[in-house]
């Protein structure tokens, strides 16, 4: 897998004041993980223990710590390709001052030593008693083995070779708690990952504060953040440490070792995501200036990143669908849809809204949104005019579901058949009704849109569009047919999410003033996705199933998400999809099937841009949207050969 960076955060058993014991603990972990990760991060002052207090100024401990660092460096010497770098903490003396430091070690060398910038000296902390504050520009210092390393705060470490690399910054515990943290400055000067060696003691409420703090830095700095903290063996006298380790990527929690849980955490960071969001976020770029009068330097560590054949993170086949707090997330989306439509109704001072109701998922969601919107405004439920328009492919199942739902919601329900008018149109344009081609299908779609538009004119209202994000992405809509409306409430809801929304919102509304709709909702969810433009089977069931023609919406929504949200290349999307399939217990797609439909996705996505360039207004609810006014600006004539 390309552009993955694997990090391990560990809290070794610490022996306070016993460097030999600590080196042995760290060495044991290194031997186990050195070929399984790119970097191992240990807690603050991991070579000595954080709670040594006045022992820090003892020459013997300082000397032992330096000897321990040299042993760690020797341990990594001659590493084969892919062996891990390691970051350890120690007291380090420079020019008669003692600093609380983190040492970055790889391939037998101490590449850099970074001092702690801000020393806590309040409450239970007394670090200024032993250490000097480390706001220092990088300079070369000599180590006991005769080699030199760079010492300072303004160091960005580039690890890797050629185009497979990552840029790292290091800060230590309290640094992250300050208003202008070293990690933020490092991020603005190129660091894509921040590594924090910490010894954060536990008090009530600090656990969640820590999550909020680290997650916030990762989010605003658009970076990966690894936080490795001291554990329970550091606990002494009045202080208790919990080993709370955290990993965040662009503000998202990738994983943690919760307080007082023993464990080592390893996760993969997707550098494409970090780099894409930094490239796209111009506010981040505007902040990239240096107000500290300190020039940042980049140290190159020419050790290759390990080859990743899998991903140590959950990759969902349905990235648009919430995996937790499902009802809460769905209600949030639904409220946005309702608010958008409600505002449009109020602004236009219309007398009604018109919805074409097919008995499918999309029109069901649009109808639920409309019913809730007029209720919120205090208008009659009859303000929603629901129109079912049976045609050549309409089945009794979808027709009955559409009429039942409209009755239960209290809509002004109307049925207007399109068969006769479409047959007349076939005659007018000279089309044989037995030729069931694209003309046969699109004439029906446009006839339905004409009916909706004309009823809206007649009744003094406007048409609410029902088409979803997936259909717009694939161009699976009839131009100037179901493609068009006066306001589209589903325009940024992908098909995989529509199903979840209808399920969650339908049952929620059942218990909140719309009694009886749940059984109808459940049958609609079980109905195959179809435009119902071709005649049904002999037994009356749906013959035309969308996914038989266009491919699985599970795959297409996956391709859409990673192509638009993170700008991933086709190769990256393909590999990520394979990994998601490997992890999935529910979805099974062969490699050839993924490759086939991925080509279909890119071909349809780019060829159908002309439809999106004139799509109607609609509610934006997520980070992926195809509106030409806000999110996606592409020429209709784009050449896409290199994507397929």
Image (cartoon, grey):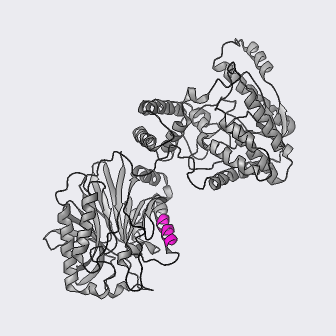
Q: Nearer the viewer, residue 150 or 258?
A: 258
Query: What span is colored magenta in the figure?
Result: 207-216
Vertical placement of residue 217 versus 638, above or below = below
Q: Nearer the viewer, residue 74 or 503?
A: 503
- Asked if residue 487 can be seen in this view, the reply is no
Which residue appears at 32% of the width and 77% of the height?
Answer: 134
Can you name the residue that lies furthest to the left here?
A: 146
13 relative to 451 in the view: left or right: left
**Quadrant position of residue 607:** top right
Q: Nearer the viewer, residue 104 or 54?
A: 54
65 relative to 344 in the view: left or right: left
| The N terminus sits in image quarter | top left
**What secondary structure characterizes most of the magenta part?**
helix
Residue 554 appears at what percent x and percent y? 54, 38
53 relative to 537 in the view: left or right: left
| Magenta-colored stretch includes residue 209 | yes
């Amino acid at each position: 897998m390309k552009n993955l960076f694997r990090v391990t955060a560990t809290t070794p058993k610490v022996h306070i004041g016993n460097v030999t014991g600590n080196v042995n603990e760290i060495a044991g972990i290194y031997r186990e993980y050195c070929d399984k990760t790119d970097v191992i991060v240990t807690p603050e002052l991991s070579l000595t223990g954080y709670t040594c207090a006045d022992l820090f100024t003892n020459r013997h401990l300082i000397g032992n710590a330096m000897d321990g660092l040299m042993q760690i460096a020797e341990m990594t010497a001659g590493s084969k390709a892919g062996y891990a770098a390691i970051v350890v903490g120690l007291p380090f003396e420079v020019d008669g001052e003692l600093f609380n430091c983190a040492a970055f070690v790889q391939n037998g060398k101490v590449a850099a030593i970074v001092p702690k910038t801000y020393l806590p000296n309040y409450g239970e902390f007394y670090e200024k008693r032993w250490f000097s504050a480390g706001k220092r520009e990088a300079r070369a210092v000599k180590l006991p083995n005769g080699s030199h390393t760079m010492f300072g705060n303004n160091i960005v470490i580039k690890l890797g070779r050629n185009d497979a690399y990552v840029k790292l910054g290091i800060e230590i515990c309290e640094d992250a708690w300050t208003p202008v943290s070293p990690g933020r400055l490092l991020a603005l000067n190129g660091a894509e990952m921040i590594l924090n060696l910490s010894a954060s003691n536990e008090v009530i409420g600090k656990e969640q504060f820590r999550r909020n703090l680290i997650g916030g830095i990762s989010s605003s700095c658009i970076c990966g953040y690894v936080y490795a903290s001291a554990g329970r063996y550091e606990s002494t006298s009045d202080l208790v440490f919990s080993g709370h380790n955290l990993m965040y990527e662009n503000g998202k929690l990738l994983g943690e070792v919760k307080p007082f849980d023993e464990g080592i955490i390893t996760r993969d960071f997707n550098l494409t995501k970090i780099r894409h969001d930094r490239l796209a976020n111009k506010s981040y770029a505007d902040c990239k200036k240096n107000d500290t009068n300190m020039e940042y330097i980049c140290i190159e560590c020419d050790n290759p990143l390990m080859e990743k054949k899998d991903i140590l993170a959950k990759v969902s086949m349905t990235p648009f669908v919430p995996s937790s707090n499902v009802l809460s997330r769905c209600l949030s989306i639904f409220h946005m849809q309702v608010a958008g439509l409600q505002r449009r109704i109020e602004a236009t001072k219309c007398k009604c809204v018109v919805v074409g109701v097919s008995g499918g998922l999309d029109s069901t969601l649009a109808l639920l949104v409309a019913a809730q919107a007029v209720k919120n405004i205090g208008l009659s439920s009859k303000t929603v005019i629901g129109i079912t328009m049976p045609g050549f492919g309409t089945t009794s199942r979808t027709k009955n579901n559409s009429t039942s739902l409209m009755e239960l919601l209290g809509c002004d329900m109307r049925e207007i058949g399109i068969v006769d008018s479409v047959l007349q149109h076939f005659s007018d344009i000279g089309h044989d009704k037995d030729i069931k081609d694209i003309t046969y299908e699109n004439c029906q779609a446009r006839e339905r849109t004409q009916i909706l538009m004309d009823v809206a004119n007649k009744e003094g209202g406007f048409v609410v569009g029902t088409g979803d994000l997936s259909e717009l992405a694939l161009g699976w809509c009839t131009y100037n047919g179901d493609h068009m409306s006066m306001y589209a409430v589903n325009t940024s809801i992908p098909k995989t999410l529509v199903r979840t929304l209808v399920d969650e919102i339908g049952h929620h509304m059942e218990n909140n003033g719309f009694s009886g709709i749940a059984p109808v909702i459940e049958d609609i969810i079980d109905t195959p996705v179809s435009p119902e433009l071709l005649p049904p089977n002999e037994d009356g069931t749906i013959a035309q199933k969308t996914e038989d023609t266009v491919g699985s919406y599970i795959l297409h929504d996956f391709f859409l998400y990673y192509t638009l949200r993170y700008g991933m290349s086709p190769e990256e999307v393909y590999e990520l999809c394979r990994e998601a399939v490997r992890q999935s217990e529910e979805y099974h797609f062969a490699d050839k099937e993924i490759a086939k439909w991925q080509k279909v996705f890119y071909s349809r996505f780019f060829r159908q841009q002309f439809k999106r360039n004139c799509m109607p207004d609609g509610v934006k609810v997520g980070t992926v949207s195809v509106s030409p006014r806000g999110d996606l600006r592409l020429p209709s004539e784009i050449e896409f050969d290199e994507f397929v």
